[in-house]
Image (cartoon, rainbow, N blue to C red):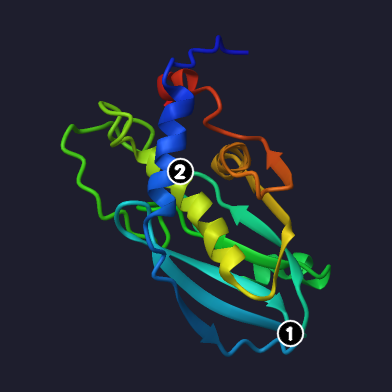
Amino acid sequence: KPKLNKQKDFDTFWKETLASSRHQPLHAKEEKIDYPIQSIKVSKIYFDGFESGTIAGYFIRPNRSGKFPVIMVFHGYTVHKGFPHDYLPWVDLGFAVCTIDTRDQSGESVDGRSYGDGHVMGWMTKGMESPYKYYYRGVYMDCVRAIDYVCSRPETDTSHIVVTGGSQGGALALATAALDSRVKICMSDLPFLCHYRRAIEAS
């Protein structure tokens, strides 16, 4: 277990960051997909990323009326949101699924921010000269904003929101659950980025 190095302004920093995200409009857009499986409805979704860029993802739900519990699925480092058929087991169980591409990785989400300090290959050191410019501050808020999007949909049962993911996705699930009390269950699989110093030294 790493030694905790929580800074004195830690709680204030995240409280202010969350408030800043809440004051930023989502400008959400939805493109319905004519999917061959008639028992589900699939949409491509877009919303504004935290402070910059555009986040892309899928919203998939059973093709029937009612409200659905939602499972948010976050992907691994350098990967992307995958394809609608990847989430059919969850939809068959009665869940709606929301999954997003992490900004500037291999999917469709765009960062939109300029990082002038340089960084090693990958994203762990991107913008690390300032906590306000650090790459993962934006990523964490994108995940919270994805929950904002889910909660804006009329078919969402907002009392049953689950977050999950593996590797980087597991870490994003943990961070999102810690930052947002609307998350009721967190299923984190082999989370990466929980010991940043070790992760940076090993990369």
| Residue at image location 65% in from the left, 75% down from the top | 154
Residue type for callout 2: Leu
| Residue at image location 51% in from the left, 51% down from the top | 143
| Residue at image location 25% in from the left, 26% down from the top | 129
On the image, the x and y values in percent for residue 150 come to 59, 65
On the image, the x and y values in percent for residue 193 come to 52, 31
Q: Are marks 1 and 2 in contact (CB under 8 Å)?
A: no
| Residue at image location 55% in from the left, 9% down from the top | 3
Q: Quadrant of the N terminus?
A: top right
- Compared across the picture, whether 188 is left or right of 93 comes to left
Q: Nearer the viewer, residue 63 or 156?
A: 156
First reached walking from the N terminus: tag 1 or tag 2: 2
Q: Quadrant of residue 153?
A: bottom right
Residue carrying label 1? 63
- Tag 2, which secondary structure? helix
- Compared across the picture, whether 71 is left or right of 199 comes to right
On the image, the x and y values in percent for residue 49 come to 38, 57
Q: Quadrant of the C terminus?
A: top left
Q: Nearer the viewer, residue 32 or 66?
A: 66
Task: From this view, report whether residue 62 is shown above or below residue 202.
Answer: below
The nearer-to-camera label among 1 and 2 is 2
Residue carrying label 2? 18
Residue type for callout 1: Asn
Report if residue 81 is visible in the image: no
Task: From this view, report whether residue 77 is shown above or below residue 37.
Answer: above
Q: Alpha-carbon distance for marks 1 and 2?
A: 33 Å
Dot 1: few (<14), some (14–19), or many (≥20) neighbours within 10 Å? some
Q: Residue furthest right?
A: 93
- Tag 1, which secondary structure? loop
